[in-house]
Amino acid sequence: MDLGHDAGGDRQPVARRRDGIDVVTEWVAAMADAELAATAADRFRAAFGDEPDGVWAAPGRVNLIGEHVDYAGGLSLPIALAHSTAVAVRERTDGRLRFRSHLGAWDGAVDEVAPGEPSGWPAYLAGVVWAMRRGGVCGNSFGVDVAVVSSVPVGAGLSSSAALECALAIAVADLVGTPTDDAGRCVLAAACVAAENGIALAPTGGMDQAIALRGRAGHALLVDSGDGSVAPVPLDLAAAGLALLVIDTRAPHRLVDGQYAERRRSVETAATVLGVPTLRYASEGELGQLGDLLLARRGRHVVTEIERVRETLRLLESGNVRDIGPLLTASHISLRDDFEVSCPELDSAVDAALAAGAHGARMTGGGFGGSAIALVDAADVERVAGQVLSNARTRGLVDPAFLRSGTGGVAARRLTPVP
């Protein structure tokens, strides 16, 4: 689920002349924390006629590498975006929930929250309160009024669902006085995963919640889904003369139409057949024992992707940032051919970026739409974006939008104090 970009004035079209034709490349800017806080508070006042207790926010993310391995106990390297989702929140003492966003409104009670109820974007908010009540973080009478604002692009697969969950989770924790240190954030991340899996019925792993709650500016975050540990990994693209171009293909990103769940079942079935806890404990050579070509292909992606993460870490630790490019491209090929979660829009973006000189490119996120990333020389960002746009138009695809991603995003945080 992508909550969607609803902030005005921060989509920046840039016109370039190519072959006598004006080509407009659309760049999506992040909202500063002060603007997020003011916009969310204004929406709260308009919706509820009173002041919120505070405003909290959490970032979207891109995953540098390590896709579809979190639910296999694997390794991932996500990066927090500067683009965030904010929630203005006021505590209630009657167990009621009232949510407002540019997508609409939902009112209900925590007692009414159940698998699939509510549906859509309210499920991610209601699920958080449900999970935190179940975990004993808040009492049975706890409820909230929430107004939402997001600067994460709509349909981009940049994890606005986890950003939404984690922003509310950190808000609830602050309101009830539960710890929000790293250990506390680990507990909150688990509650957000439970909300997404149990109420929103999206069978995702925990990578997105980990980066939203435990990320660090200037770093990627090594997420070990086997034991739940995280470790910051320094990543200074600017020092290497590089940039990460994020390409929102605008192909609708869907995780609840059965395809994502089918991939997860395949991975879990393969592990069961091989007699290992997860495919992290399998080798590529063992996959022939599966006796099923489809399961073997699915398993090969997971096993080789985990190894690509390890190799990426080795290169980053040795300062060879530019050399991770071929690993990004190999990841995309594996996701496209073995895991079959790409789509024409994603392939077009990756192909065009590589043809324009990107060091590497890949789809990022769950796939079936969403976004791609390209590792490019910093001086070439706009040129590569222009080639991606041109290629999409040549193929008859919708115009993509673009984000410039450094590693400047910060984890879930309070933007305004509780009075």
Image (spheres, helix red, strand yellow):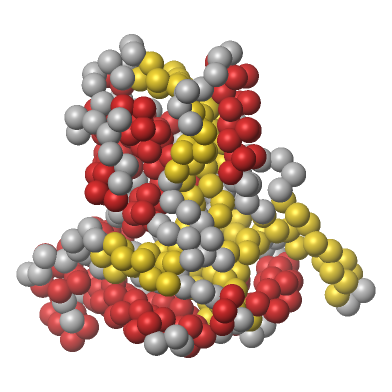
The answer to which quarter of the image holds residue 305 is: bottom left
Q: Residue at x 47, y 23 (%)?
A: 419
In x, y percent, where is residue 10?
A: 71, 48
Question: Is residue 41 left or right of 23 when viewed as pictured?
Answer: left
Say above or below: 349 vs 145.
below
Say above or below: 106 vs 267.
above
The answer to which quarter of the image holds residue 327 is: bottom left
Q: Which of 239 and 134 is in front in this view?
A: 239
Q: Residue at x 26, y 76 (%)?
A: 303
Q: Which residue is drawn at 59% across and 50% down?
A: 153
Question: Is residue 392 left or right of 101 when viewed as pictured?
Answer: right
Question: Is residue 182 left or right of 153 when viewed as pictured?
Answer: left
In x, y percent, where is residue 85?
A: 52, 42
Q: Which of 370 and 132 is in front in this view?
A: 132
- Is residue 190 at all visible to an observer of this figure? no
In x, y percent, where is residue 334?
A: 39, 77
Q: Which of 207 and 118 is in front in this view?
A: 207
Q: Which residue is drawn at 48% across and 60% down?
A: 217
- Is residue 37 at all visible to an observer of this figure? yes
In x, y percent, where is residue 234?
A: 42, 72
Number of numbered tags placed on the structure image: 0
The residue at the far left in this view is: 275
